[in-house]
């Protein structure tokens, strides 16, 4: 407050001299003196606040520059980390691709082996079915052949064996049956 009062006192005479425009050459001198006094008073009054303002502003700018440098350093570190991760990502993708191809190849081999095993089982089952069908057909054929043989033999016997031959065969059969029974009973 006292500085403002001093400023007012100093400026009052200079304003009076400026109003008193008696001499033409002294007018410039008065103006120069007025400006010098004004600047001197401003220097005395505003020097410390201006210095404080600029010091604070300098400190603020220095802090911002430091913060910006730290942010730049962090950004560079992040960038380098991301670059490493990106390089590692390419490697990892290659490994994943190779692993996928290996798994796909192994799966293909497994499926082929299963298909081969299934085909072999089908062939084996087909062979077994064919063999079984052949055995059944042979058995039917044998049975039919034996039935036919018996029919033919019976027909031949009927045609070739006379009643006298039948009586004789029956007597021989009865005598053979009686002989072992009489020997085993005694």
Image (cartoon, rainbow, N blue to C red):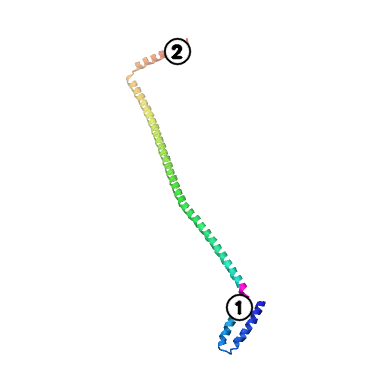
Point out residue 69 in the picture as x, y percentages from the top left corner: 53, 62
Q: Which residues are magenta?
A: 40-49
Tell me: residue 182, above or below residue 40: above
Point out residue 152 in the picture as x, y percentages from the top left corner: 34, 24
Point out residue 84 in the picture as x, y percentages from the top left corner: 48, 53
Kindly check if marks 2 and 1 are in contact, taking CB atoms under 8 A apart as contact.
no
Q: Residue at x 38, y 14 (%)?
A: 172
Q: CA distance from mark 2 to mark 1?
A: 169 Å
Q: Please tell me how crowded label 1 is: few (under 14), some (14-19), or many (20+) other residues with Cα within 10 Å.
A: some
Q: Nearer the viewer, residue 117 or 43?
A: 43
- The quadrant holding residue 39 is bottom right
Question: Callout 1: helix, strand or loop?
Answer: helix
Q: Nearer the viewer, residue 124 or 89?
A: 89
* Residue 40 numbered mark, or none: 1
Q: Nearer the viewer, residue 64 or 19?
A: 19
The residue at the far left in this view is 160
Residue wearing tag 2: 181
């Amino acid at each position: 407050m006292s500085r403002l009062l001093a400023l007012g006192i100093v400026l009052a005479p200079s304003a009076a001299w400026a109003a008193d425009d008696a001499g033409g050459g002294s007018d410039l001198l008065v103006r120069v003196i007025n400006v010098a006094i004004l600047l001197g008073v401003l220097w005395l009054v505003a020097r410390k606040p201006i210095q404080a303002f600029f010091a604070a502003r300098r400190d603020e700018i220095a802090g911002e520059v430091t913060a910006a440098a730290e942010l730049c350093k962090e950004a560079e570190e992040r960038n380098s980390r991301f670059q490493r991760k990106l390089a590692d990502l390419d490697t990892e993708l290659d490994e994943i691709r190779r692993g996928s191809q290996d798994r796909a190849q192994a799966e293909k081999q497994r499926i082929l082996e299963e298909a081969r095993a299934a085909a072999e089982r089908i062939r084996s089952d087909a062979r077994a079915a064919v063999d079984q069908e052949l055995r059944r057909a042979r058995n039917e054929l044998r049975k039919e052949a034996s039935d036919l043989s018996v029919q033919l033999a019976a027909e031949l016997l009927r045609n070739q064996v006379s009643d006298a031959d039948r009586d004789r065969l029956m007597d021989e059969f009865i005598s053979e049956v009686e002989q072992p029974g009489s020997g085993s009973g005694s």
